[in-house]
Amino acid sequence: MTLTLPMGGRLVLAAMTLAGLACGLPGGAGPQPPPGTPATPAIFLPAEWTATPAPPTPDVPAGWEEFHAGRVHLWLPERFEGGDTGAKFQAILDTLKGLGPEYAQSAQILEENPELFVLWAFDPVKGPSGYITNVNITKDDFPGGITIEDYLEASVNGLPPHIQMVDQEVVSVGAFEAGKLVLGSDIQGLKGLSVVYAIREGNRFWNVTYSTDAAEFVERTPTWAQSIRTFRLDT
């Protein structure tokens, strides 16, 4: 059944789907706790993490690959796989299903709502915990007059208990104004961190989400900061 989503719902769904990737890992969460289960404890950024200042030019590191989906362009390290969920939808879906039966819910969301994700990519080299580092882009249309702050608030308010906001700010991505969220997930001790850029273009938000194991977050932060500077929209 196709989902009808409120404002910020696509960002929330992306976060939930990414957290679902953690659920399928050996020793991961399995079924979600029943309603009424207390929320997980507060999730914090690694102590050594600091914001990475953006350089003035969006230079692409040698060996990176451009991922192109419709009007969207984004560069990632060359070992990433995936891409346009229109042109490569079945291949991406088969990859997700191939991760194991525990990923059935995430695969079902993607299969029943193929229009939700513009782009989905992942690093086939798993980290020490087995967490699958991945990137996706969604687009979210909304009525005029909605501010970035309103959009971020609606998105954060829609997060499930096992995903929490740990940092929030308004930033720039190229010529676009954007919101930036850092989201933490803790599923039975398996911790993940995501950076979400909600990039505003007129009456549309393009949500670019980078997600990885919390233990890899510090190492991968410069990669995410470099990647988002390559974000481009065709006119």
Image (tube, rainbow, N blue to C red):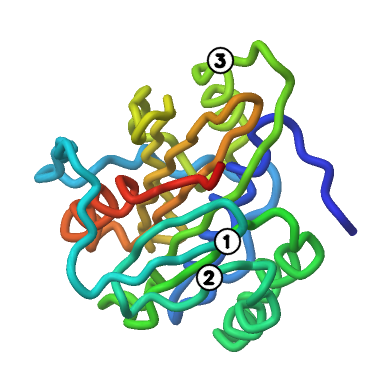
Residue occupied by mark 3 = 147
Residue occupied by mark 2 = 83
Q: Earlier in the sequence, mark 3 or mark 1?
A: 1
Residue occupied by mark 1 = 69
Asked if one can make out residue 29 in the rendered structure from this viewpoint, the answer is: no
Q: Could you tell me how far apart the alpha carbons at marks 2 and 1 are, in whole angstroms?
A: 7 Å
Percent position (x, y) of residue 138? Answer: 60, 49
Amino acid under disc 1: Ala
Picture quadrant of residue 203: top right
The mark closer to the camera, 3 or 1, is: 1
From the viewer's perspective, tell me whether residue 161 is left or right of residue 2.
left
The kind of secondary structure element at disc 1 is strand
Quarter of the figure with the C terminus:
top right
Q: Are the residues flagged by discs 2 and 1 in contact, CB closer than 8 Å? A: yes
Q: Which mark is residue 145?
A: none
From the viewer's perspective, tell me whether residue 34 is left or right of residue 41.
right
